[in-house]
Image (cartoon, rainbow, N blue to C red):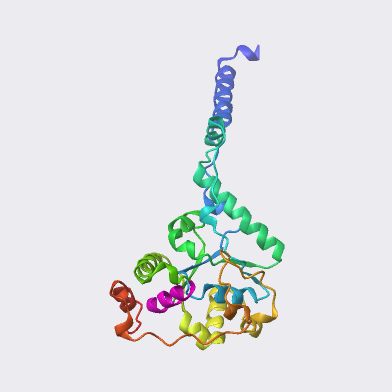
Amino acid sequence: MILHDPRVRRLARRVRVKARRVITAPPPVLGPEATRLVPEPVFVISSIRSGSTLLRVLLNSHPDIRAPHEMHLRTLTLSYSEPYTEKAMGLLELDQRELEHLLWDRVLHRELVRSEKKVIVDKTPGNAELWQRLHEAWPKARFVFLLRHPASVVASQMDSRPDKGIDWTVRHIRRYVERVDAARDALDGITVRYEDLTADPEAECRRLCTYLGVEFTPKMVRYGRKDHGPFQVAMGDWSDKIKSGRIQEPRPLPSPEDVPEPLRAITRKWEYPC
């Protein structure tokens, strides 16, 4: 009989071995580029009190760009209520870090779909502490580095929170600007200065549009004609200036002698007078 033919038996064994290999082959490892619904989000990296809310409403005024209020992704975390949940996710090769990335991505995607726009921008100043994680989660993310004279940032913060005192404020701002500087050294992106943005908003918006791959529209500089959501505490700037709907002139640059000593090095590096 054919079944007793040694050649047939050897062939059958090879087929069974091959079948077992196919069945037990591990699933492919999926990196972020394969699993992100929003592969190229845009993140503004800036200190507090650097004009990031102004930048966001200018961008949000573009028909193809959605720039919502601060999204605070770094505080949107995930936890397991049971040990076996963590084990189950581990068998899927999903750790807590990647699960949080998937959650963040889903939030951005939902907002982008809801807006019916093409590009989404998150301008949360806390991103200055999160830039390595953002780059890990979205290897193709784009970054906008928003700079402002560090001493002007201190002055603006003192106007907002005088109760903190000058020494605390300088330390606080120094931590922010140094993190912005580290991100700017490590990542590709576009640098925008608050002073340039307020002096010639059209020119800076044109540069940003080129970087983001959209066509400039004059509607961007007339941000007061659009609804950008509420201006309130913890969601961005809430001052009368931003609520006015008009781009305000910045305060004069500080004189070199008014730059706090702990901020002099970064001020020089950013090519401001010091």
Q: Is residue 20 visible?
A: yes
Q: How many marks?
A: 0
Quarter assignment of residue 67: bottom right
Residue at 59% from the left image edge and 79% from the top image edge: 240
Q: Residue at x 46, y 76 (%)?
A: 156
- Rendering coords of residue 258 (x, y %): 32, 82
Q: Is residue 36 visible?
A: no
* Along the line of sight, the residue nearer the viewer: 257 or 175: 257
Kindly identify the residue that appears in the image at 53 percent across and 31 percent down: 83
Residue 158 lies in magenta, yes or no? yes
Q: Which residues are magenta?
A: 148-160
Q: Residue furthest front?
A: 163
Front position in the image: 171 or 18: 171
Give the image location of residue 13, x and y in percent.
56, 20
Residue 190 % position (x, y):
47, 74
Q: Quadrant of the N terminus?
A: top right
**Vertical position of residue 146 compared to residue 10: above or below:** below
Q: Which residue is at a point 63% across and 73% down the rendered structure image?
A: 60
Q: Classify the position of the C terminus by image quarter.
A: bottom left
Residue 232 is covered by the magenta coloring: no
Q: Position of residue 197 (x, y in %)?
A: 51, 83
Q: Identify which residue, 71 or 230, lies in the foreground.
A: 230
By secondary structure, the bulk of the magenta-drawn segment is best described as helix
